[in-house]
Each structure stands twice: as structure tokens, then as C-alpha cells.
Amino acid sequence: MPVSVVILAAGQGKRMNSDLPKVLQPLAGRPLLQHVIDTARSLEPESIYVVYGFGGDAVQAALGTASVKWVLQSEQLGTGHAVTQAIPAIPAEHTVLVLCGDVPMIQAATLQRLLDVSQASGGLALLTLEIPDPTGYGRIIRDAGGGVIAIIEHRDASPAQRQVTEINTGVMAAPAELLRGWLLKVGRNNDQREYLLTDVVGIAAQAGTRVDAVAASGAAEVLGVNDKVQLAQVEANYRQQRARELMMAGATLADPARIDIRGTVSVGRDVFIDINAVLIGNVNLASGVKVGPNCLIVESHIGAGTEIHANSIVDHAVVGEDCRIGPFARLRPDTVLQADVHIGNFVELKNAQIGAHSKANHLTYVGDATVGSGVNIGAGTITCNYDGANKWPTVIEDGVFVGSGSMLVAPVRIGASSTIGAGSTITASTPQGQLSLERSKQVSVDTWKRPRKYTDAEKQDIVDEALKK
């Protein structure tokens, strides 16, 4: 049976105390609303309608996905009114699934259970939750036989009804044709003077339509975000969930509470991740990878057996098998390392392709370069790729040895199996198999004396004399 999803995302979120609309607040680096849209999309519905209002231009600009249909709620007159804005476009034979744009942890499996119940009965299905302290939440009211007959908001509940611990989560599924009729009967006779979606439960029950309650899998997946404290709670829940997924896939985490996953991470067997690692975007860690403490990995593939030592950054890079990176190394976008490459402390690579078994172990910058296999790049070497207006390439062929403190001024090619003498500034391509070096003549000054410590008066005299010139 076809499904249309309606996501309520029009609220301002005043308690956020932020200029950013509530549904754009970030969870794991993505807007809250994006998480809900992604989950909805995984159900393969016919359409996804996002009802927007406050900050609508910013919301559309940030999400801008062609896979949703935007519906404006120009006046925020309640959740029932919000669904009314979308319902005319939904075919009568569809099942409508109503989601909240500020409930980002909702699981696709839970929503599928809800849809299955609604479609099997042809009635209304509510997602509910039992919690020990239901203060502030709408209560699920049942009749003597256990059937759901209404949702009563906390402020309107009697003392007896406030003892009910089963609450409304704001998520429901119902046949479009029936929901359309129920919404027409919703009024504004409440303290908020709003059209509340929860009123359709009582209307449906009075009409003899079956109303089922489907239990959520836990409180974490239906926690809404109304302020920065709740945002932090959801972020913690998200980290915990993602960490568990990695461990179940075979990764060992030094401390599951101290890893931050902001994307899709896949791991092979026997991966080890130390504390405070941050993984962003699509990250693949092949079997046997070891990630040290305080590392950042963004949109990268790390080959089997590679070790990334402490405080290193790998950003939009491809790293081959059995490499050694860091500590304090930085691989910038478009860097590719073949197998068994060593990139050491305080080495930065950018748009560099490094051949197998090559090394750059200390204090080096390699940018816009192609480096062959078996190359050794000494400490303090720089590929001078930028002339102030243009970027130029450097090619270092197989078997080259670059001495420490060398400047390779691009565009330049260093011939295979050649050696660059330490301290050289190379401005022209070098032949294969030869030593190339460029140095000023060394001199020693026998009359030079090391500076001594001057008194303040002596220093002032020297300054005064210098300023007269």
C-alpha cells in the first residue's frame, strides 16, 4: 500500500535561543530535519512532504533536496493545522505517516511496524512510550477494555489521568481519506487556541475506527529536541548507538563514550579506535586498522593494517595497506598513498600521490606532487608549488633520495634514483641517477665575537646611535 510521509518542521524553537531554526540545529554534523528525511526515505514512500514555516528560506536552502515536497504553513496554528496544509495533495488510497522534524533518532524499523499495524487494521496507529515521569507529555487514555480512546495533554489532564505513564510521541499513521475527514472536525477549544493533531484520536475512536498503540523501542529514539540540553542528550544517544554498531561489526573502541561519528562508517575485522577520534562522512576502515587518540578522519578510505598515530588528520584521502601515518600528520584532500608508505610527524600532504614504500618522516610539505615508489624525502623538505598566483606540479620519480632542508621549486622533475643534497634549492629538473645540489659557499669569520649581555644604559646608547643614521 503506498505511503506518503508528512514531516512537521514549521516550529521556531524559541527555547533554543538561537537564530538558527530548530530543525536546522546540528546533530552529528547534519541538521535534525535531515536525519528525519533520511529515515523517511529509507521506507521508500511515494512522497515526502515537509511542512515548513519559521525560517523557511533557510530551511529550504540548507536541505534543498529534490526528493521532498515543501509545504508552507504560513501561520503556526498547531500540529493539526500543519498536517491540513499537506493532506490535500495526498491521494486517498495512501497511508499517511506523520513524523516530527525535531525527533531525529526515530528508527525505520519502528516506523515500518507502525505502518504495518495501520495498514492491517485500516485504522489509526499511534507510536507510544511508557516512561516513569510523564510530566509535560500528552497521555494515552484507554477505555475499560484497553482500547485507545483519546490523547489528553498534560495541562488538560485530571489528577487521575496524570498518573498514566503511557505517552504520545507525536508519530502516527492513518489512511489518508480517514485522516482528511478527522482533521476537518478538529477545533481550537484549548488553552493554546490551536488545531491539535492529537484531537484526531478521540474523533477516530468516537467514529468507531480502530485505534492501535504501537510501543517505541525505547525513549532514546523518540526524544524530541526543544533546547540545547535536549540536543546534547540526543547527540550522546547518537554517539552511543553508532559506537555500538561499530563494536558489533568487529571494532574495538578504547572508550565507546569518547568517539564522535558524524556519518557512515564501515569497519573490517579487528579495527582499533582510541579515544577522542572524530569520523566524518563516509569513512572506511579496513581490517586491522589502528586509529590513535585525537585523530580526525573525514571522507576517507584507510587500507588494511594501516596505523594512524595520535593527533593526525586524514581528510578526503585514500590510504593504502600497511601505511604508517603521524603522529601530528595531515593528509589533505586528493591525497593518495600506495602500500607501505610512512608519513611522519608534522608532515603535510595536499593533492599528492605517493608511491609504495616511500617515506616522508619529518617536518615536510608535499603539495601538488607525484612521488614514485621507494622515495625518501628528508626532514624539512618543501615542494614549493605556489608562485603567488598559480599552483605548479612536482614529480619525484622512483628511488629518489631528497636530503633534509631541500626546496623543490615547481614545476620540476626529480629524475629516478637521483639524490638531492641536503640544503639545496632545486629550480630545474634533475637527471636520473646523479647527485644534484645547490649551496652557497661556506665561510668562517675568525674576527667574529659572540654578543655579550649589555646593560640597559649600553643598549639605549646603541639604539640612539642606530636611530640617528
Image (cartoon, rainbow, N blue to C red):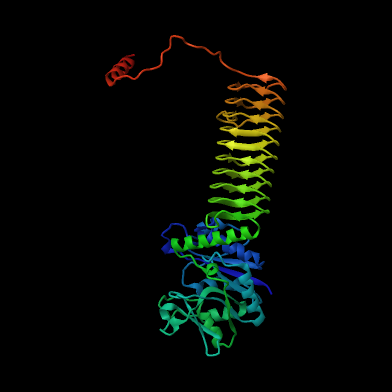
Q: From the viewer's side, name the closer residue of 375 and 222.
A: 375
Quadrant assignment for the N terminus = bottom right
Q: From the viewer's side, name the closer residue of 386 and 267.
A: 267
Determine whether 362 is above or below 2 in the image: above
Q: Residue at x 67, y 36 (%)?
A: 354
Percent position (x, y) of residue 456?
28, 21
Determine whether 4 is above or below 327 in the image: below
Q: Residue at x 59, y 85 (%)?
A: 209
Q: From the viewer's side, name the closer residue of 363 and 438.
A: 363
Residue that protrudes farthest toward the left in the picture: 457
Percent position (x, y) of residue 8?
53, 68
Percent position (x, y) of residue 235?
51, 60
| Residue 351 in which image quadrant | top right
Residue 306 visible, this angle: yes
Determine whether 446 is above or below 166 in the image: above
Determine whether 194 is above or below 30 in the image: below
Q: In the visual, does 168 lie left or right of 119?
A: left
| Residue 106 in which image quadrant | bottom right
Residue 57 visible, this angle: no
Quadrant assignment for the C terminus = top left
Residue that protrudes farthest toward the top in the picture: 447
